[in-house]
Amino acid sequence: RAADPAIIILPVEQEHFEWSLTNSAPLQSALQNFSGQIAYHLPSHKLLQLAKSTSLTLRPKNSQVPVQGPTVFTNGSGKTGKAIVTWKEESEWQVLEGHELGSAQLVELRAVAMAFQQFSQVPLNLVTDSAYVADITQRFDCSLLKEVNNAALFSLLKTLWCAIQVRVHPYYIPHIHSHTNLPVFTTEGNARADMLANPAWVAPQPDKIAQAKASHSFFHQSAHTLQKQFHLTPTES
């Protein structure tokens, strides 16, 4: 006839077992008629005893100093929806472009996620002028992801979080202020990312008639000459 053991030794702490017993119906059912003793300690193996007294932590991937790897620049524009990743390879600038509808922060998140996916196998320096994105990316190394009501935002956060979690190599992501005095390479890369993400600024068109009048008052040109030089109609000249 089978009989219950006199003692059950569990390699867990007592408070953990008691929590499990309180919250697990199958465990409660299994121990319902058990009348023996339950002990809580690790087996006597040296490695297990060492683990009990040793605190183990994961090596952080988020570096506080630049790492030996490529430097990429990201930018995103809420106006154009362009998410830009750009970097210099040998002497040529490379660019990776994506699109995301929404605020500038959402588009910038898309750009940073693209960068981590593109450079998943190497240490990475990533430069952004978005304090919001830099802060999130620095914290994602050792954080859990909580769902948010904004579906688009949560999707991007999850994509970025997953890309960081599967990384083996470290990354460095400083936040820089736009249009500040920085090393030439950093200024150039940041300006290039900004230019690629944002629409070109269109200068105001010159007033041809006003220019023609100013030219005539100085050079005393004829109407025919003004018409030809400033591309005016006969009526305007």
Image (tube, grey):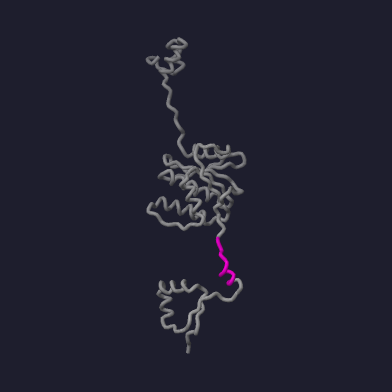
User: Which residue corresponds to the image point at 58% horizontal and 41% vertical from the top-left?
Assistant: 88
User: Which residue corresponds to the image point at 44% horizontal and 84% vertical from the top-left?
Assistant: 35
216 in relation to 180, above or below: above
Count of residue discs: 0
Majority secondary structure of magenta residues:
helix
Could you say which quadrant of the image residue 28 lies in? Answer: bottom left
Farthest residue to the front: give it.
53
Query: Is residue 88 shown left or right of residue 144?
Result: right
Q: What stretch is highlighted in magenta?
A: 48-57
Q: Is residue 32 magenta?
A: no
Of 176 and 76, the residue lying toward us: 176
Q: Position of residue 199 (x, y in %)?
A: 45, 36
45 in relation to 168, above or below: below
Q: Position of residue 113 (x, y in %)?
A: 49, 49
Of 205 and 171, the residue lying toward us: 171
Q: Where is residue 45 in the image (x, y as percent from the top left)?
A: 60, 74
Q: Position of residue 145 (x, y in %)?
A: 45, 57
Could you say which quadrant of the image residue 213 lies in? Answer: top left
Instruction: Answer whether residue 96 is visible to the viewer in this image.
Output: no
Instruction: Answer whether residue 40 is visible to the viewer in this image.
Output: yes
User: Which residue corresponds to the image point at 41% horizontal and 73% vertical from the top-left?
Assistant: 22
Query: Is residue 164 shown left or right of residue 227?
Result: right
The quarter of the picture where the C terminus appears is top left
